[in-house]
């Protein structure tokens, strides 16, 4: 029986001769991207992203540029190069009359910063500032004599406004007017309310968002260098800083919630919304703090092993030139792709035909099929992002595998990162496509649930239903992401397709889970603490910055995005340690199964790693009969040869 079980084990050998894997999936991905290219071209031709970003008036003129006339609209096609701001004639009483806002809007060169109480004030403002607040057909000299001036000019009194960076609109500064104005503008398109809210929040606090993003990048780079070079001192310091950061950020959130709730000047709906979000942030932060502090206390005795683990991982990374900087290239590629995706989304969201109404105004009618294109485009965002991350994982895993399965540790293979990239692009892109597709399949139901929850947000039990279903969807996604990484490593070793590699990886991990699981999990936990450190101190900087600029009423969403960006940045840069450790342990498990340390089958493993695993799992007594001298001048066995 033992002979039969041994014969059923997969043959683990570092492949020298490879073949292309999962070709059909690569072809499917190419066809999918052909569809994305078609949608992008269609969006560029039919869309007008600048109409959303720059703003436009009721007559089809985009503010800040020259325009082409629309048939049937006499006031269209005007040169608005010097008129960059959208001004609503009735900004204090805006209402939605599907599919547009009821009030007339004009392009003006400057917004009135003081209240205008009469037509004479409007005329004086136009002559002094060159900004005409009445309909274009009404001459400035006729403001006070034309009997139709009351219909062609703004409702009096005109409240003081400011060219707030909210899609270049003249935003009223009166609290009552602003509350009504903001609620109508944000909900102008029901299907895009979340997108409008996010984009307006980013534009409102763009300088602060950029500064905090740079701060997150700096923290992440410091963490990477610290994990690489000063593991012993840094890990103790990191845990202390994380504990301090969690307690401090939670305390600040509760204090800000109390301060905003009891602030008598909190009158606007957006400010009241901030109070609710602060309460949610404070509760979430407190729960995370309690959980992480409990885990830190339970795992405190394994801290010495974590120091040794990162010392070993640091040595492996040190043997592979430029591996530490590989995530930077991945992140830059992701940024370029996301910018492209947002540009296409803006164009797609404004794709429509201009039609003149009976009153000489212009309406934009959405083209048919746009909704389906938007969903297709959104799937492309998830799938392509996951594919780029999968390629990064395969490159790192391939480089680590190349160096691990090398007899002479003092003479590492030349250019392992370039060799891994060449192997990926020549043979295994289809495997990365298939793995990323499986993650996408598990992400999409959660997005659909979030969309349905947003539609049914007035239903009493909708949120609880979403939370339950979301947890049910997220758990298998996290497990699949973990096994995907090991499948990519197996593909880098054996050159097999995704399914075969996943099956082999699961089998060997199941047989060695007792030996390696605790070590790998604690290493991942420390890396997660590093990400928490970056998020905590970035969010704290954001809280201080936005709190001192309370005129930016819509700062809750930018703060959430800053926290997400900080986590994403730290995850991208620290993933090199995570992938290296996981790959190293999988290679170790394979090495232990296929070799026995004898002269005929010597280990590939480094003596330091073998000792570390044995000590951490208290298995030294059970392995005393094995020869633990892996470095012999025996050339038996197959080594992984890097591609030239």
Image (cartoon, grey):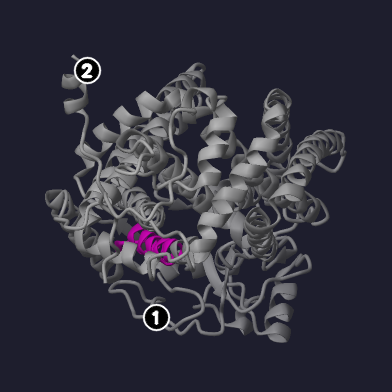
Q: Main secondary structure of the magenta part?
A: helix
The structure residue drawn at horizontal position 46% and vertical position 33%, both measured from the top left corner, is 454
The structure residue drawn at horizontal position 30% and vertical position 55%, both measured from the top left corner, is 635
Residue sitting nearer the eye, 271 or 357: 271
Can residue 155 be seen at all in this image of the molecule? no
Residue that badge 1 annotates? 67
The structure residue drawn at horizontal position 86% and vertical position 38%, both measured from the top left corner, is 259
Residue sitting nearer the eye, 264 or 600: 600
Residue sitting nearer the eye, 385 or 304: 304
Residue sitting nearer the eye, 535 or 355: 535
Residue that badge 2 annotates? 2
Label 2 vs label 1, nearer the camera: 2
* Magenta span of residues: 333-360
The structure residue drawn at horizontal position 36% and vertical position 48%, both measured from the top left corner, is 382
Q: Where is residue 29 in the image (x, y as percent from the top left)?
A: 20, 54
Can residue 63 be seen at all in this image of the molecule? yes
Q: Position of residue 224 (x, y in %)?
A: 62, 57
Dots 2 and 1: beta carbons under 8 Å?
no
Q: Position of residue 89 (x, y in %)?
A: 59, 62
Q: Position of residue 485 (x, y in %)?
A: 37, 43
Determine whether the residue tagged by mark 2 lies in a helix, strand or loop: helix
Residue 164 vertical position relative to residue 137 in the rendered view, above or below: above
Residue 193 vertical position relative to residue 144 in the rendered view, above or below: above
Determine whether the residue tagged by mark 1 lies in a helix, strand or loop: loop
On whether residue 342 falls in the magenta region, the answer is: yes
The N terminus is located in which quarter?
Answer: top left
On whether residue 2 falls in the magenta region, the answer is: no
Cα gap from disc 2 to disc 1, whole angstroms: 81 Å
Residue 570 vertical position relative to residue 57 in the rendered view, above or below: above
Q: In this view, does 445 lie to the left or right of 241?
A: left
Q: Earlier in the sequence, mark 2 or mark 1?
A: 2
The C terminus is located in which quarter?
Answer: bottom left
């Amino acid at each position: 029986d033992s002979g039969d079980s041994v014969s059923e084990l997969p043959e683990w050998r570092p492949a020298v001769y490879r073949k292309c894997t999962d070709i059909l999936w690569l072809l499917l991905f190419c066809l999918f991207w052909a569809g994305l290219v078609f949608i992008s071209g269609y969006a560029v031709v039919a869309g007008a992203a600048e109409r959303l970003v720059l703003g436009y008036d009721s007559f089809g003129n985009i503010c800040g540029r020259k325009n082409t006339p629309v048939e049937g609209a006499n006031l269209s096609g005007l040169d608005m190069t010097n008129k960059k701001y959208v001004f609503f004639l009735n900004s204090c009483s805006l209402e939605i009359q599907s599919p547009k806002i009821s009030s007339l809007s004009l392009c003006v060169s400057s917004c009135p910063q003081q209240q205008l109480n009469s037509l004479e004030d409007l005329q004086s403002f136009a002559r002094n500032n060159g900004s005409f607040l009445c309909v274009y057909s009404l001459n400035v000299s006729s403001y006070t004599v034309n009997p139709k001036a009351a219909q062609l000019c703004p409702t009096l009194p005109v409240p003081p406004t400011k060219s707030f960076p909210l899609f270049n609109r003249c935003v009223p500064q009166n609290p009552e007017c602003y509350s009504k104005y903001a609620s109508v503008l944000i909900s102008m398109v029901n299907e895009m309310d979340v997108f409008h809210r996010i984009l307006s929040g980013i534009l409102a606090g763009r300088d602060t968002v950029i500064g905090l993003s740079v701060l997150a990048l700096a923290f992440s780079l410091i963490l990477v260098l610290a994990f690489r070079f000063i593991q012993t001192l840094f890990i103790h310091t990191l845990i202390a800083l994380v504990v301090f950061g969690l307690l401090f950020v939670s305390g600040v959130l509760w204090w800000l919630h109390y301060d905003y709730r009891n602030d008598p000047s909190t009158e606007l709906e957006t400010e009241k919304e901030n109070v609710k979000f602060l309460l949610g942030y404070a509760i979430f932060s407190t729960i995370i703090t309690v959980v992480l502090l409990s885990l830190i206390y339970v795992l405190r005795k394994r801290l010495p092993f974590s120091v040794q683990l990162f010392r070993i991982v640091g040595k492996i990374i040190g043997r592979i030139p430029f591996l530490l900087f590989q995530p930077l290239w991945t992140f830059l590629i992701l940024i370029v792709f996301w910018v492209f995706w947002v540009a296409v989304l803006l164009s797609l969201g404004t794709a429509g035909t201009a039609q003149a109404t009976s009153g000489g105004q212009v309406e934009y009618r959405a083209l048919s099929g746009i909704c389906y294109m938007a969903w297709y485009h959104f799937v492309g965002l998830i799938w392509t992002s996951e594919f780029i991350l999968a390629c990064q994982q395969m490159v790192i895993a391939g480089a680590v595998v190349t160096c691990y399965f090398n007899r002479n540790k003092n003479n590492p293979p030349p250019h392992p990162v370039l060799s891994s990239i060449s192997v990926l692009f020549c043979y295994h892109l289809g495997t990365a496509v298939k793995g990323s597709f499986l993650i996408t399949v598990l992400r999409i139901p959660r997005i659909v649930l979030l969309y349905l929850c947003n539609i049914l947000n007035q239903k009493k039990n909708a949120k609880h239903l979403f939370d339950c279903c979301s947890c049910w969807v997220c758990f298998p996604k996290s497990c699949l992401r973990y096994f995907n990484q090991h499948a990519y490593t197996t593909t880098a070793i054996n050159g097999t397709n995704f399914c075969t590699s996943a099956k082999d990886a699961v089998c060997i991990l199941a047989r060695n889970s007792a030996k390696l699981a605790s070590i790998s999990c604690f290493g991942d936990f420390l890396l997660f603490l590093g990400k928490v450190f970056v998020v905590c101190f970035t969010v704290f900087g954001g809280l201080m910055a936005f709190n001192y600029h309370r005129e930016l009423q819509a700062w809750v969403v930018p703060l959430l995005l800053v926290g997400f960006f900080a986590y994403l940045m730290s995850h991208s840069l620290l993933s090199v340690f995570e992938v290296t450790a996981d790959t190293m342990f999988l290679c170790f498990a394979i090495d232990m199964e296929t070799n026995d340390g004898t002269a005929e089958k010597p280990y590939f493993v480094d003596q330091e790693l073998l000792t570390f695993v044995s000590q951490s799992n208290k298995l030294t007594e059970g392995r005393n009969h094995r020869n633990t001298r892996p470095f012999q001048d025996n050339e038996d066995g197959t080594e992984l040869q890097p591609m030239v």
